Amino acid sequence: DIVMTQSPLSLPVTPGEPASISCRSSQSLLHSNGYTYLAWYLQRPGQSPQLLIYLASNRASGVPDRFSGSGSGTDFTLKINRVEAEDVGLYFCMQALQTPLTFGPGTKVDFK
Amino acid sequence: QVQLVESGGGVVQPGRSLRLSCAASGFTFSSYGMHWVRQAPGKGLEWVAVIWYDVSNKYYADSVKGRFTISRDNSKKTLYLQMNSLRAEDTAVYYCARDLLPSAGTRGYYYGMDLWGQGTAVTVSS
């Protein structure tokens, strides 16, 4: 199974400032077709998860452009260029390359 | 509107069974791979199972293999999770979720879940 790790696990942020979360996979998520099967989710308190990014760098429908995903192979980053109040919550990365699909442990983002 | 609505959760004794349902609306259910994902209290997300759009393949997490069965009825636009031999560690909120693109999984890979239900809570306790 592919193991996903994230850092940091807790991220205090300041509204209006940038934030960044790292995710690493135990195997490359690059498929022979050239695509990288990594997704990012945000779970706001008391809500279901929401897809933010798929294929490592593609924003899902309706996701603000302050969110961006980057990376390749085994190392990935989610960036928020200016954190807003609604961005507080748990962020998860997930590999979608093969079953079992596996999630990172989550990064809790809240205000300082 | 486009949505998924789970039902069937509750409190059940260890060793007993429960069946979860997920009713889909607002999209062509029969075109999409569907997942179950669970979240134990205060914990992260754990993928449970996936079923392809055409029911031809199903895959499970090792933690539930042999005890849980994912199924779907495309005519009823409903996804199911039959859970047998339940254990305390199965206690979680169970979410059904749609894969992003139609026919996901048929080449081995998926894209991520872009539509989630509100979740249904399962508690396994004596």
Image (cartoon, coloured by chain):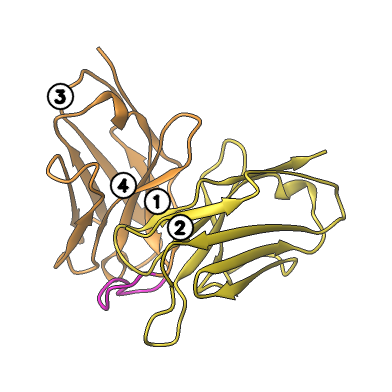
Chain colours: A yellow, B orange
Tell me which residue sits at (45%, 82%) in the image: A35
Q: Which residues are magenta?
A: B101-110
- What SS does tag 1 mark? strand
Residue that badge 1 annotates: B4
Which class describes the residues within 10 Å of circle 1: few (<14), some (14-19), or many (20+)? many
Q: Amino acid at mark 2?
A: Leu
Query: Which of the marked residues, 1 or 4, is nearer the chain's N terminus?
Result: 1
Q: Chain of mark 3?
A: B
Looking at the image, is mark 2 or mark 3 nearer the viewer? Answer: 3
| Circles 1, 2 touching at the beta carbon (< 8 Å) | yes
- What SS does tag 2 mark? strand
Tell me which residue sits at (46%, 56%) in the image: A4
Residue that badge 3 annotates: B16
Q: Which mark is residue B115?
A: 2
| Circles 1, 4 touching at the beta carbon (< 8 Å) | yes
User: As displayed, is residue A37 above or below residue B73?
Assistant: below
- What SS does tag 4 mark? strand
Give the Cα separation between the discs numbered 2 and 3: 30 Å
Q: Which mark is residue A17?
A: none
User: As displayed, is residue A10 above or below residue A34?
Assistant: above
Q: Which mark is residue B22?
A: 4
Looking at the image, is mark 4 or mark 3 nearer the viewer? Answer: 3
